[in-house]
Amino acid sequence: MTNIVNFPGLGLYFEINRVAFTIGIREIYWYGIIIGLGLLLGVAFSIYEAKRVGLSSDNVLDVALIATPISIICARAYFVIFNFHQYKDNLLDIFNIRGGGIAIYGAIIGGVATAYIYCQRKNIDYRKFFDVGAFGLLIGQIIGRWGNFVNVEAYGSETNLPWRMEIFSDELSKMVSVHPTFLYESIWNLIGFIGLLIYRNKKKFEGEIVLLYIAWYGIGRSWIEQLRVDSLPYDASFKISQIVGIVTAAFAIYLIYKGRKKSSQTKEEIAIEDKDI
């Protein structure tokens, strides 16, 4: 299970074993460890951010514990729905998640839905809670994409750019140079995280941070997805994640515009009332 991954333009050469270690006869993959690390660090930062804005850290932990299995199920379901031809002849393979096949958008949908229901039941301002969760999501995605590096997946079409990634193609039976799109997305999310970290104290309304995250991620995913060769569906010229990214980004930008306009009007009304007094 050793993969050769090179970055010849950068002078970097790797031999990567997908298996980190074994427990008895069970192999533990680096992919799972990296995803788990991203989840833990994302939750840890969300707890810190929750305390900073006056939310309970217990609520963050509750949502993390409830949403994690639901997000995994939704991530798998999303992948299976858009790639059902692989499973229609053997439906039991749908449950073989160790064989690969999950989608980040499915995980996000499951996590957001769970958090929203939890906030409604606990009478918590979901917009404020989502602003906190946006940072955790970004951290998870920044780190999680390196699981794709270990698995040699989420890569793009062939290229000769200086930062090209060289991998072995089973289809061509030779080494090929491709776009390291896993790296593009990781860096894009890192830039977004830093930007939101700087902006968080200047936000105009509750929920603006998560909307900025949705807009930023959607824009990035829409152009990165066009470079990938393993997107859902595999044989489409325009990918599902591109469509989702464009639609969600556009909707988020519209809501940001509406939210800022409303916030500005409220401030003007307060200023007028103060002047009258």
Image (cartoon, rainbow, N blue to C red):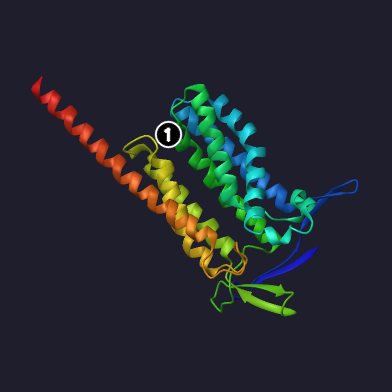
Residue under the image location 45 percent in, 31 percent down: 126
Q: Position of residue 80 (x, y in %)?
A: 67, 54
Residue under the image location 50 percent in, 60 percent down: 242
Q: Amino acid at mark 1?
A: Arg
Residue under the image location 43 percent in, 54 percent down: 247
Direction from residue 160 to residue 87 in the image, left or right: right
Q: Quick one: which residue is furthest to the left in this view?
A: 276
Direction from residue 244 to residue 18 in the image, left or right: right
Q: Secondary structure at mark 1?
A: helix
Report how many numbered discs are placed on residues in the image. 1
Query: 6 or 1: nearer the eye?
Result: 1
Residue under the image location 73 percent in, 53 percent down: 30
Q: Quick one: which residue is furthest to the top in this view?
A: 277
- Density class for disc 1 (Cα within 10 Å; few <14, some 14-19, many ≥20) is some
Q: Position of residue 259 (x, y in %)?
A: 31, 40
Q: Position of residue 41 (x, y in %)?
A: 60, 41
Q: Quadrant of the N terminus?
A: bottom right
Q: Quick one: which residue is furthest to the right in this view?
A: 24
What residue did someone put label 1 on? 127
Q: Quadrant of the C terminus?
A: top left
Q: Position of residue 257 (x, y in %)?
A: 30, 46
Quadrant location of residue 202? Answer: top left
Q: Quick one: which residue is furthest to the front in this view?
A: 89
Quadrant location of residue 275? Answer: top left
Q: Is residue 115 above or below residue 246?
A: above
Q: Is residue 227 above or below residue 264?
A: below
